[in-house]
Amino acid sequence: MLSPNDKKLEKLDPFYRPSVAKQKTSAEIISEARNALRTVRTQRPYTPQEDQRKLFGPASSRTSENRPPSSFSLYASSFESSDSRSISGTRLSPLELKPKAPASPTTEEDPCLSFPKPPVDPAKIRRISSARARLFRAASQGPLLPDRTLPPAERKKTVESKETVRMGNSMMKINGIYVAESKAIGLVKSRLLQPTDEGGLSEGKEQELFKGTTSLPSPLRNGGDQVKGRSRAYSCLNSSDPSRPQTKAVSKAGLQVKDTEMGADDVFWNTRIIPILNKLEKGGDIEMVCAACTQLHHTLEEGNMLGNKLKRRNILLKTLYKLVDVGSDPLNLKLAKIILALKVSRKNLLNVCKLIFKISRNEKNDCLIQNDSILESLLEVLRSEDLQTNTEAFLYCMGAIKFISGNPGFLNEMISKGAVEVLMNLIKQINENTKKCSTHLPNSGHLLVQMTATLRNLVDSPLARSKLLSVGAIAQLCTVMGQFMSDKDVCTNIARIFSKLTTYHDCCVTLANDSRCYALFLNLINKYQKKQDLVVRIIFILGNLTAKNNQAREQFFKEDGSIPTLLSLFRTFYKLDLHPKRRAGEGDEQPKEQKLQPQVEDVLIKLTRVLANLAIHPGIGPAMAANPHVVGLLLTTLEYKSIDDCEELVINTTATINNLSYYQVKNSIIQNKKLHIAELLLKLLVSNNMDGILEAVRVFGNLSQDHDICDFIVQKNVHKFMIALLDAKHQDICFSACGVLLNLTVDEDKRVILKEGGSIKKLVECLREFGPTDWQLACLVCKTLWNFSENITNASSCFGDEDTNTLLVLLSSFLDEELALDGSFDQDLKNYHKLHWETEFKPVAQQLLNRIQTHHTFLEPLPIPSF
């Protein structure tokens, strides 16, 4: 006689019976146990490494006419002798020379300096001097002073009142002092001609030098040669004829400071720097010159002479500039490092950045760059120089850094030296300037291409990703993408950065929380719909954002035109994929089309992934299942693509259909086309691809809740295939196949067919093999066996004697013992499985055990199965 509890068990309905409102559907139970609505994974788009190092690669949207060159010539003459930096305003101290009366003029003429005429009336001299007219400008306007000889009395007065130096027969008056021409040359070089920061005389110094001069060389005073006067005078002062005594005096005075006037810096210059400069001027083999450059840099650093405050900086730079023409990359790197340390600017800064850029284009020079620590010098340029003034120099500086960042051996060094912070600071400056002025800086787009390409290389490092998050890089990059949306190269590089970052959870969450990104991505898709390299990355990013974030799914779906934009993109690339391929010999375009085919398919793969992820949201999934355009494109893909041709696309499409088939809504297109879908799935079941088979079985698990699909399964002998899959050693395949069998057992007329196919024996074997470690599969097997035993009168007649006894032993052991979990599980996972083992599996197992025991009259002793 049955107990009250046993009688209660007799009235329980089969599991998965759709007609019972309180019972969960098969899809609901599978969703709880195995996440029936699943996200889809795909590979990140591949970016091939460029064969040559250039500012802009072959895929750049820039033409050769509107982008800076990557190849150019650079010589010593490219550098300016004078720099744009402001020079010191220190005035020259007066000459402490006792004047001598000038000798009477002779008839000899110097080829460079004409004899001056006697000075004019002092009163007129004062009037002209007070006007502060520049010497050479006045010379271009004709004679300043009348040519006349002073009376003896006046001449004597002038000599007594002014300090005058006499040598030869020519006289010049400098700052109110009469000086003989030949002697003036030495004085000019040694004391009066103070150098500019980077070599030569600046205009201001020349003006100050000759201010107050009352007598000029005749070529300047004569109107016939006024235009050439300045250049001739300068060339005479800088004559390099070694036979001239003035040249030796100039050279000595220019390099060395007189002992009587030397300070500590002068002594250091004479004793430590000049010997090294002499080595550099003598030359020799490259190794010796490189060693001398290294010594020079260390010595300047020791003497605190780096920067732009060094008095004799021009002499130093001139020597370094001349060595550029040697054309040695190792030497040029050492020269560039010293020149940058001397804080050059403007054109010279541009040229030295170009020099390093040119060297870094050759990958073989990476070891030289690393050994000379030139990276630190380049980062210092970006850190300390003004962006708006030196945009072009920054461009080539960043180009070199981009090349360096492509070498994995530099990543740690770059990050440790603050490359991430420096780059993001520049990007922030560009954003702020664009927002403030409503226009872009010149070359800012070119510069952003280099910076974003560098960041793309840096994000491979976990430390770089951490720093990018800490400085708010993702928000800044979104701003750049919005401001430079018309620049495809910039947007593509940022998309590459995001495609890398969003494969990591923390970065993905940060971008998903920036609500601007969804509209940005949709705008980019609409603007560059046929640009595969950009849109494929945008779609990949959206797939990452919607993979595990329900809020991201909702935000994207609510953006105006989100689904229509995806469908439009799908149609565009679907048509490209269907483009007829040329036969061999029909044209030269065939290789190109064959090469583009995988790229077109890649966009479709990523698109179906986004659709599958969106369908997980309970508010979006039903709407998509009822959208004929969405379902139509998915079914079309299954119709014209085979799993052998494009495995990932077919699997992703099937997974999307699986997610949409979960929703049992009245206006579902999936439900309306369920038989057509079932026909398409048969192709996957008979394939040799286990992933494709698994996806097809999952869809049948949802569709088999419908009576028509159950009939289709039996008619096409799909049920035999499901029973055979229970032999697979793959737990997920066994689980999905068991779900289909569970739905079939709801109909009493199909239980006999399944029993005849040997389904019960296979289910018991699954329970024995996977039950101890997989509560989900064990629970599903017990529910299926429960449906088999709904109208049971004898357990042995239902399950067979052997399987009945095995079930009694298995179920008893599972109920008496704790779940034997794999030792590799972490503690949280163990706790999770233990909880569900107790709450999900044990109640079902206990019901099944009670039913078997109630209708079983004997129990033969059997050994406890080993797990």
Image (cartoon, rainbow, N blue to C red):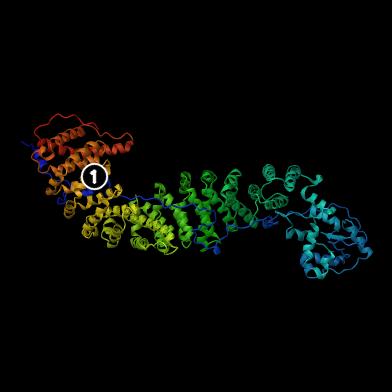
Q: Residues within 10 Å of mark 1 (few under 14, many from 20)?
A: many
Name the quadrant of the N terminus.
top left
Q: Nearer the viewer, residue 281 or 103?
A: 281
- Would you name the residue on which mark 1 appears? 725
Total tally of numbered discs in the picture: 1
Q: Is residue 775 left or right of residue 419?
A: left
Q: Position of residue 408 (x, y in %)?
A: 51, 45
- Residue at 77% x, 64% y: name it: 134
Position of 571 relative to 728 (above/below): below
Task: Say whether residue 132 is visible.
Answer: no
Amino acid type of disc 1?
Answer: Leu
Q: Position of residue 106 (x, y in %)?
A: 92, 62
Residue sitting at the far right: 152
Q: Is residue 771 left or right of residue 272?
A: left
Secondary structure, mark 1, is: helix
Residue sitting at the far left: 1
Q: Position of residue 506 (x, y in %)?
A: 40, 47
Q: Is residue 297 left or right of residue 424?
A: right
Quarter-wise, where is residue 88 in the image? bottom right
Position of 42 relative to 132 (above/below): above
Position of 138 relative to 74 (above/below): below
Q: Position of residue 20 (x, y in %)?
A: 15, 50
Q: Nearer the viewer, residue 342 or 135?
A: 342
Q: Nearer the viewer, residue 757 or 173?
A: 757
Name the quadrant of the C terminus.
top left
Quarter-wise, where is residue 776 in the image? top left
Task: Say whether residue 298 is visible.
Answer: yes
